Image (cartoon, helix red, strand yellow):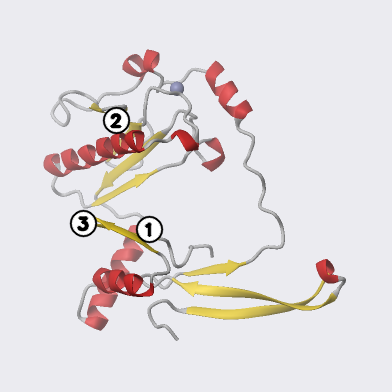
Amino acid sequence: MDTFFKRIQSKTRLFNPLKDFSLDEIPFEIRYDPLTGETGRVFDTPYRPPDRPDIAEIIQRSREMFCPFCPEALEKSTPLFPKEFIPEGRIKQGNATLIPNLIPFDTYAGVSILSAEHYIGIEDLSPEIMRDAFSAALQFIQKVVGFDPEIQFFSINWNYMPPSGSSLVHPHLQVNCGYIPTNHQRIQIEGCKRYLKENGKSFWQDFINAEKERKERYIAEIGPTFWVMSFSVISD
Ligand SMILES: [Zn+2]
């Protein structure tokens, strides 16, 4: 068994109504996250995934309501950072504007508004729009590090459109920086420490080497970054 990418293949038995109630065996797989040990389940579904939700009505309704991120409201209706932290009050980068989050998740909480456009279809999220939004987020993180070097935990989060939990249609990212890790960050740190203690080396270098060797999920290395698909989705 692959000790790095551990998976258990199993099956369940049933009389299957989709096969005239003949006795059937349906396979599934349990995968372990190589860092945290959390398990995820992988299986085929005999049902078609639901069609994309019809969001036209949500978009139309949102256009009729007040949107603080649209250009005519942004200056007057969104907060400013304290002058000693970010003298300009907000961070502007190309199409993107980063403002403080009125609903803070952490000590330093920013919202990177992708552009002046109220709605951007997922197919219209151009490389330039993504670059500007993430560059603004990165600038914010760098300013936090310069202003408060005790901050150790950073995350960039995105809920695209209300069906994924976003409160507003107008596309935006959330950037959170704080003293205390999120649960997911904490179990990753614990996993890194455990791996180092057991193996005497960094988990990440071994993980990158293992993914590159297998060529199953590896996408690319760009500069100092490594891109890969998940081996195990956290589903249970
Ligand atoms: Zn808007």
Residues tagged 1 and 2 counted as in contact (Cβ below 8 A): no
Q: Which mark is residue 224?
A: 3
Screen quadrant of the C terminus: bottom right
8 to the left or right of 16? left
Beta carbon of the mark 1 residue lies under 8 A of ligand 1: no
Look at the image and tell me whether residue 167 can be seen.
yes
Which label's residue is closer to the chain start, 1 or 3? 1
Q: Secondary structure at mark 3?
A: loop
| Neighbourhood count class around disc 1 (C-alpha, 10 Å): few under 14, some 14–19, many 20 upward | few
Q: Which mark is residue 98?
A: 2
In the displayed structure, would residue 225 be above or below residue 86? below
Residue displayed at 13% across by 47% down: 149
Which label's residue is closer to the chain start, 1 or 2? 2
Mark 1 belongs to which amino acid? Answer: Asn
Closer to the camera: disc 2 or disc 3? 3
Which label's residue is closer to the chain start, 2 or 3? 2
